[in-house]
Image: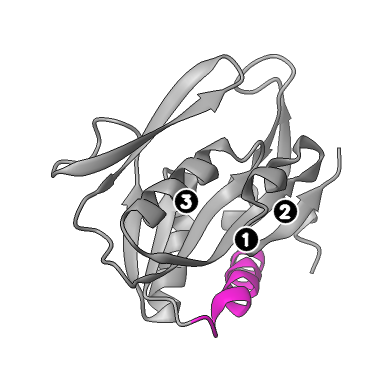
Amino acid sequence: MDLKNYIRTVPDFPKTGIMFKDITTLLKDKNAFQYAVEELYNLSKNKGITKVVAIESRGFIFGAILANKLGAGFVPVRKPGKLPAEKLSETYTLEYGTDSIEIHKDAIQPGDIVLLHDDLLATGGTMEAACKLVEKMGAKIAQISFLIELSFLNGREKLKDYDVHSIIQYDE
């Protein structure tokens, strides 16, 4: 199944010049959605994953399902101010400025084997920051997965020390 057929491209969203890859069109098709879940699951099913760490917000959709299928815990990584308990934060560089993500301090234990997941790999900055958080907590990153990769943005380069997979790639 060619999942690109289920991704809608929305020009100039959220700002001029961006060609936004909208996954809601994939999610609403039960066959495409199930196929995408199985493809992602097959990438990580034999890795001994104990926690799936997913990035806000679209990463939660597949991340929670993968955690359930893998028999692992689910850990959300959120934007600042969204998590209620004691947390760790990591700041990363954007094209213009910086941003941060947070994780609960008690979400991961040393020795956990982690799958990190997000819906889309662009420049890799957010996922790189998530990796730093997970490693600060003493866990091992077994794999990183994405539904979509915009390979022309070279985000994989920031993640070159990890086992990175995506199931849909756009070269331009």
Q: Nearer the viewer, residue 66 or 7?
A: 66
Q: Which label's residue is closer to the chain start, 2 or 1?
A: 2
Query: Which mark, residue 29?
Result: 1
- Which span is picked out in magenta? 31-47
Q: In which quadrant is the C terminus drawn?
A: top right
Determine contact: label 2, label 1, CB under 8 Å: yes
Residue 57 image offset from top left, x and y in percent: 43, 43
**Above or below for 144 versus 171:** below
- Residue 147 position, x and y percent, is 63, 56
Q: Are marks 3 and 1 in contact (CB under 8 Å)?
A: no
Which dot, 3 or 1, sits closer to the camera? 3
Q: Which mark is residue 131?
A: 3
Q: On the image, numbered disc 2 is attached to which residue?
A: 6
Q: Nearer the viewer, mark 2 or mark 1?
A: 2
For image coordinates 65% across by 73% down, the residue present is 39
Dot 2: what SS?
Answer: helix
Q: Is 39 located above or below residue 14 in the figure?
A: below
Q: CA distance from mark 2 to mark 1?
A: 8 Å
